[in-house]
Amino acid sequence: GGNCATVSGGDGATVSGGYRATVTGGYRATVTGGYRATVSGGNCATVSGGDGATVSGGDGATVTGGNCATVSGGYRATVSGGDGACLSLRWYDAEGERTRIAVAYVGDGEIKKNTWYRLDGKGKFEEVAK
């Protein structure tokens, strides 16, 4: 789909959209959106968005966004973002017996741009070699 398009695909689909597009894919889909796009994918999906995009993926997904993007993933997901991106991942705190959300900001502390992260067993971001 082009700019401002609404595009969706099912399990295993390859789906893309341009500037400000809304792009959605299912399980194991490859989903891509451009600048300021809203991009989402299901479990084990590969999801990417441009600068200012809102990008989300399900459990086990690989999710990346550009500068100032909002990037989120489910359990066992990996995330990456550009300068000023907000990264969030869901995890289960067995000790507290509840689901929690861990948040990190690219450029704060040791969180680096365009670097892959996942959560350790305590909900702390750790770098992943890709």
Image (tube, rainbow, N blue to C red):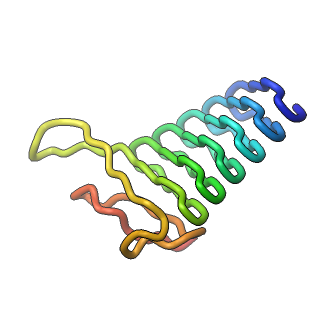
**Residue 68 % position (x, y):** 59, 55
Extreme-left residue of the structure: 95
Describe residue 54's horizontal placement relative to residue 15 as left or right: left
Describe residue 105's horizontal placement relative to residue 36 as left or right: left
Residue drawn at the location 71% of the way across and 39% of the way down:
37
Q: How many marks?
A: 0
Quadrant hosting residue 93: top left
Q: Is residue 96 above or below residue 110?
A: above
Q: Is residue 127 above or below residue 46?
A: below
Q: Quadrant of the C terminus?
A: bottom right
Residue drawn at the location 47% of the way across and 70% of the way down:
107
**Residue 103 % position (x, y):** 36, 52
Extreme-right residue of the structure: 2
Describe residue 83's horizontal placement relative to residue 31 as left or right: left
Residue drawn at the location 32% of the way across and 50% of the way down:
102
**Residue 85 % position (x, y):** 54, 57
**Residue 129 % position (x, y):** 52, 73
